[in-house]
Amino acid sequence: MPDWAWTLVGVLGGVLLLWLALVVALWATRPDELRLRELLRLLPDVVRLVRRLAADRTLDRGVRVRLWLLLGYLALPFDLVPDVIPVLGWADDAVVVALVLRSVVRRAGPDALDRHWPGSPEGLAALRRVARLPA
């Protein structure tokens, strides 16, 4: 087998191992069923929140870029873990949303969520619980 073929096999094997490590990490940190269902119920409000935050010119440019990238990721028809895989297929989206929102709250403050939240106060409290954000 030529050297380039061995290199290709090595690269593909490395990518596969990284993907498997990601799946294992998601499995270990996945939200429990109740939290995942709660977040899925809040999904329309969360998407509106992310869009409103991304359009807010008072927020730092880096924060807005992260939010637009998150919207792009959520709009893609493919994910890191396909949605056909039970629990993990949706868990990867929930984990990515939670990580980005934590980052936004650290940089912009929790009042940014309060200003832009389109849903009920109970929904915002549930989002904070699910994403482990400060109350």
Image (cartoon, rainbow, N blue to C red):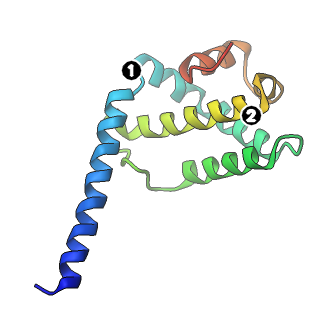
Q: Is residue 52 left or right of residue 17?
A: right
Q: Can residue 85 be seen in this view?
A: no
Query: Which of these two is toward me, 89 or 27?
Result: 27
Query: Which of these two is toward me, 1 or 20?
Result: 1
Tell me which corner region of the image, top left, top right, bottom left or bottom right, holds residue 117. Answer: top right
Kind of residue at disc 1: Glu
Q: Is residue 58 left or right of residue 90?
A: right
Residue picked out by circle 2: 107
Q: Which residue lies furthest to the right in this view?
A: 58
How far across and how far down the image is residue 19, in percent? 32, 51
Res. 56 mark: none
- What is the distance, in whole Å, between disc 2 and disc 1 at their CAs? 29 Å
Q: Is residue 51 visible?
A: yes
Query: Which of these two is toward me, 31 or 107?
Result: 107
Residue picked out by circle 1: 33
* Residue at the spot 67% in from the left edge and 12% down from the top edge: 122
